[in-house]
């Protein structure tokens, strides 16, 4: 696992956008795993700017969403498919038919979950998966005690997560209780995982995920099982890491030929 500690959210966004551009340049038909929440927003803004500057095209790229709410109308502004369209897809040249999300409106959720797994496999798997982390250590919407080998399925949100996400809705009651999320086992199959965390509220879950025990109590600790993980943090989110100096030292001396 590589831990990169940068000054603030904007530098975090720039570095992550650079990694995505690098991935898309190496593989025009790249499959990107996209996350919602506020953490990836600076990276998406940077990608839009880089696209407008002619630095990158997403014409042949496919994108798969990490998770989606159950129970919102498809055109609800907080439905994750709408969020990702607004923040990224509609602002670049990624064709809308290349944007995939779980079919939460199909009326048969278990079948929609199976179909989503098959879809990801048919695309050849995810090249680079962006991830945020919840205050309770969730990854996607895999809440504490999620099986470390779970697949795409329906989950019930904790009160904590519903309260955290209430800021995006008119009232806390409006936040759905149910979601469909890629499982931790599904996420682990992506070839490169990039976790973004910024701000002091993320310091404890980040420390638990990176330096704590591998345990479903902190779902993000499952990252420890993956051979290629990059965790990009700002100083505040890195605030509780015991080995922070070692990570800084490693980053300073990273061989110039080595990709993220
Ligand atoms: C949300 C999303 C996650 C996200 C996390 C943190 O509930 N389902 O994918 O990583 O919570 O969100 P934020 O980045 O806004 O702190």
Image: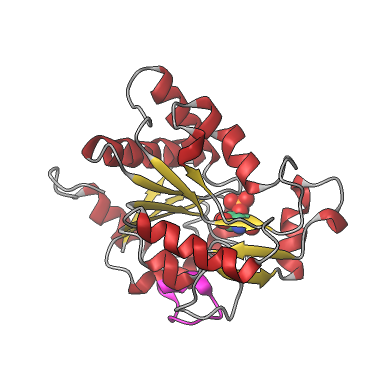
Q: Position of residue 77 (x, y in %)?
A: 73, 40
Closest to the observer, 173 or 217: 173
Residue depicted at x 31% and y 56%: 124
> What colour scheme has been applied to the protein in the rendered image?
secondary structure
Residue depicted at x 73% and y 67%: 160
Closest to the observer, 29 or 22: 29
Q: On screen, 168 above or below 52?
A: below
Q: Position of residue 190 (x, y in %)?
A: 35, 60
Q: Where's the N terminus, which quadrant?
A: bottom left
Res 19 → quadrant? top left
Any part of residue 147 in sight: yes
Residue depicted at x 45% and y 30%: 46
Residue depicted at x 55% and y 51%: 101
Q: Position of residue 58 (x, y in %)?
A: 38, 32
Closest to the observer, 35 or 68: 68
Q: On screen, 254 above or below 27?
A: below
Q: On screen, 122 above or below 27?
A: below
Residue 104 horizontal side relative to residue 23, left or right: right
Res 225 → quadrant? bottom left
Which residue range is magenta in the image? 210-222
Residue 219, magenta (yes or no): yes
Ligand 1: give its quadrant. Answer: bottom right
Residue 157 horizontal side relative to residue 133, left or right: right
Residue 237 horizontal side relative to residue 129, left or right: right
Any part of residue 240 in sight: no
């Amino acid at each position: 696992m590589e831990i990169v500690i940068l000054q603030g959210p904007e530098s975090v966004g720039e570095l992550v956008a650079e990694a995505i551009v690098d991935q898309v340049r190496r593989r025009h038909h790249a499959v990107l795993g996209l996350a919602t929440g506020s953490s990836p927003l600076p990276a998406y803004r940077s990608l839009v700017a880089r696209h407008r500057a002619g630095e990158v095209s997403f014409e042949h790229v496919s994108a798969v969403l990490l998770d989606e709410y159950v129970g919102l109308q498809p055109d609800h502004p907080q439905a994750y498919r709408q969020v990702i369209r607004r923040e990224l897809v509609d602002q670049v040249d990624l064709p809308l038919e290349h944007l995939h999300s779980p079919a939460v409106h199909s009326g048969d959720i278990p079948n929609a979950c199976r179909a989503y797994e098959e879809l990801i496999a048919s695309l050849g798997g995810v090249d680079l998966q962006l991830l945020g982390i919840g205050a309770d250590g969730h990854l996607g919407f895999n809440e504490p005690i999620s099986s470390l080998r779970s697949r795409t399925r329906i989950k019930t949100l904790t009160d904590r997560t519903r309260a955290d996400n209430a800021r995006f809705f008119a009232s806390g009651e409006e936040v759905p209780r149910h979601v469909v999320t890629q499982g931790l086992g599904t996420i682990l199959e992506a070839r490169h995982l990039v976790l973004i965390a910024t701000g002091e509220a993320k310091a404890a879950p980040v420390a638990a995920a990176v330096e704590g025990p591998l345990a479903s109590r902190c779902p993000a600790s499952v990252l420890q099982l993956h051979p290629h993980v990059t965790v990009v943090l700002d100083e505040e989110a890195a605030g509780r890491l015991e080995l922070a100096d070692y990570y800084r030292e490693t980053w300073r001396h990273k061989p110039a030929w080595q990709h993220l």
